[in-house]
């Protein structure tokens, strides 16, 4: 039925939650764009036939969404002298066609909206995910990467780059010698300078102000928060006794 | 005794900006000359940045509560970061105990700045197209933020184009239409949303609703109201959002 494909896409957009994203449904997107193209072609046909009967109509004159005004023009242009121009067609039939055009116009608009909503929500999910991973697209887990379209993976990389550009510009301006720990958790203000952490997965050696620390799985350390913030965020370390 | 020493030391490390250090001094001067006693009060550590720190804290809370993007407090951010830089260079010369307290302090200021900037970025992303088009909001952004917003818009458009817009008929490819029912593709902040605000300096009678009597707004009163109503008061600094 008309609009069903877009509805399915909208439903999938709704399935996206904070922690889950379904696979990118390329097939469905293709179906919706296909339907939209088909409907648009039909609309243009109808306008053309109406135009040949009445005043000349330009199918593309800024009509994309304003379907009401559009169908009115259609009526005004085609309806008036239908009987004269085309002997067989009656007034009722002309109105029928204009009704159909309006319906198609609305469906086209709705399809586009569903497409936009679908992609928009997915991008929103992707950005949230990236922030939680310190804006490092390479840290996106493999099972999630599979569900992303190549175009979305590309978006993730470029988004990270955009952020890096901003961060560098800001740090250059505000604290050339220092870092703002830009992607550190923004939820809670720091309460302690040091945190006690337990190593969940081997991280190798990290360099801190006070020397090199070997973060072996299972060991526990007392370290400066900014030094290990990123490892905490991606779950390699675990905060012991958080407040 | 120990604590007392420690605080005054920490305080004076900051306050060294008052007299002897060129760069950071300028930051502090207006405020320290305005306050009687100046240096003697240096044990109240938080006072040392009286102008910029509370100002940025307020801007931060306002920013996080206001539906629209507010004015960028660039000067406060820069001044604070200059202090941070100054402080960081002082730390090395301090005994470990004091150094740790100072580091903590520095970390917290950095947190504030970071959180403030990120809150703004998040808001910019929300209505990026609108903000980059409207001169009012363009002025409210720093150059870096404006660049970011433009880049963000371009990135989103590119993604939509490549994902499906290019597959649609050319007349359907724009991203800023208004639908027949008045719904726009370019989203705008909802300035009629409800906010809580506290009165910072007595406003007197204020007309909340044209059809009702004005209400007297005194210092420290708290109101819940539409953002659009107190928007101008917020700009003048007469109320703060909470």
Image (cartoon, grey):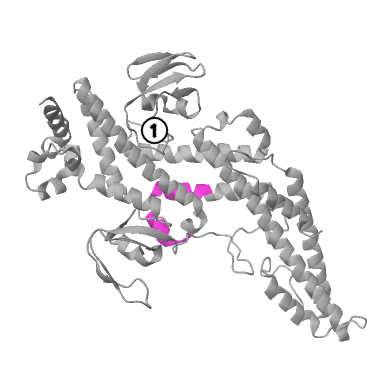
Pinpoint residue B236: horizontal percent, then vertical percent.
28, 62
Q: Is residue B150 magenta?
A: yes
Residue B34 belongs to the span the image colors magenta: no
Q: Is residue B136 visible?
A: yes
- The residue nearer to you, when weighing B85 against B180, is B180
Residue in view at x 11 percent, y 27 percent = B5
Name the residue located 38 percent from the left edge and 78 percent from the top edge. B211
Secondary structure category for the residue under label 1: loop
Along the line of sight, the residue nearer the viewer: A17 or B133:
A17
Residue B88 picture location, percent across and down: 25, 29
Q: Position of residue A2 (x, y in %)?
A: 79, 60
Vertical position of residue A200 compared to residue A94: above or below: above
Q: Is A49 left, or right, of A191 in this rendering? A: right
Classify residue A240 by image quadrant. Answer: top left
- Taking the image as shown, residue A201 lies to the left or right of residue A97, namely left
Name the image quarter holding residue B29: top left
Specify the farthest residue to the right.
A88
Q: Name the residue under label 1.
A: A181
Judge from the rendering whether residue B125 lies leftward or rightward of residue A82; answer left or right.
left
- In the displayed structure, B198 sits above or below B26; it is below
Rendered-image quadrant of the N terminus of chain B? top left
Q: Give the range drawn in magenta.
A: B133-152
- Which chain does the numbered disc 1 sit on? A
Total marks placed: 1
């Amino acid at each position: 039925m008309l609009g069903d494909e877009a509805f399915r896409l909208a439903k999938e957009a709704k399935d996206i939650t904070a922690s889950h994203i379904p696979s990118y449904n390329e097939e469905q997107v293709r179906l919706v764009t296909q339907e939209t193209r088909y409907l648009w072609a039909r609309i243009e046909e109808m306008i053309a036939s109406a135009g040949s009967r009445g005043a000349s109509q330009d199918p593309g004159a800024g009509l994309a969404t304003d379907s009401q005004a559009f169908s009115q023009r259609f009526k005004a242009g085609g309806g008036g002298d239908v009987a004269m121009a085309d002997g067989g067609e009656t007034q009722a039939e002309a109105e029928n066609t204009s009704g159909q055009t309006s319906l198609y116009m609305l469906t086209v608009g709705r399809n586009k909206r569903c497409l936009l909503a679908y992609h928009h929500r997915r991008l929103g999910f992707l950005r949230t995910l990236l922030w939680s991973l310190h804006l490092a697209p390479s840290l996106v887990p493999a099972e999630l990467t599979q569900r992303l379209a190549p175009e979305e993976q590309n978006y993730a990389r470029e988004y990270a780059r955009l952020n890096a550009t901003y961060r560098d510009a800001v740090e250059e301006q505000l604290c050339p010698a220092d870092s703002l720990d830009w992607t550190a958790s923004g939820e809670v203000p720091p309460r302690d300078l040091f945190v006690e952490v337990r190593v969940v997965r081997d991280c190798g050696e990290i360099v801190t102000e006070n020397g090199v620390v070997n973060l072996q799985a299972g060991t526990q350390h007392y370290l400066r928060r900014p030094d290990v913030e990123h490892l905490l965020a991606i779950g390699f370390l675990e905060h012991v006794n958080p407040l | 005794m120990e604590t007392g020493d420690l605080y005054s030391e920490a305080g004076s490390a900051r306050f060294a900006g008052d007299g002897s250090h060129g760069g950071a001094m300028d930051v502090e001067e207006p405020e320290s000359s305005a306050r009687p006693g100046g240096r003697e009060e240096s044990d109240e550590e938080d006072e040392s940045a009286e102008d910029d720190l509370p100002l940025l804290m307020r801007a931060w809370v306002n920013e996080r509560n206001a539906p629209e993007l507010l004015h960028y407090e660039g000067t406060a951010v820069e001044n604070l970061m200059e202090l941070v830089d100054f402080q960081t260079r002082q730390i090395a010369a301090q005994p470990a105990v004091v150094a740790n307290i100072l580091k903590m302090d520095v970390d917290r200021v950095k947190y504030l700045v970071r959180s403030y900037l990120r809150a703004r970025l998040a808001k910019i992303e929300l209505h990026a197209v609108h903000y980059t088009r409207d001169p009012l909001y363009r002025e409210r952004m720093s150059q870096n933020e404006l660049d970011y917003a433009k880049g963000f818009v371009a990135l989103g458009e590119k993604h939509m184009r490549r994902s499906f817009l290019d597959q649609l008929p050319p007349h359907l490819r724009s991203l800023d239409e208004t639908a027949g029912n008045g719904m726009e593709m370019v989203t705008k902040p909802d300035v009629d949303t409800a906010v809580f605000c506290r009165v910072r300096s007595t406003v007197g009678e204020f007309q909340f609703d044209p059809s009702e009597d004005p209400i007297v707004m005194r210092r420290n009163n708290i109101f819940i109201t539409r953002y659009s109503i107190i928007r101008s008061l917020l700009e003048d600094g007469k109320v703060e959002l909470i």
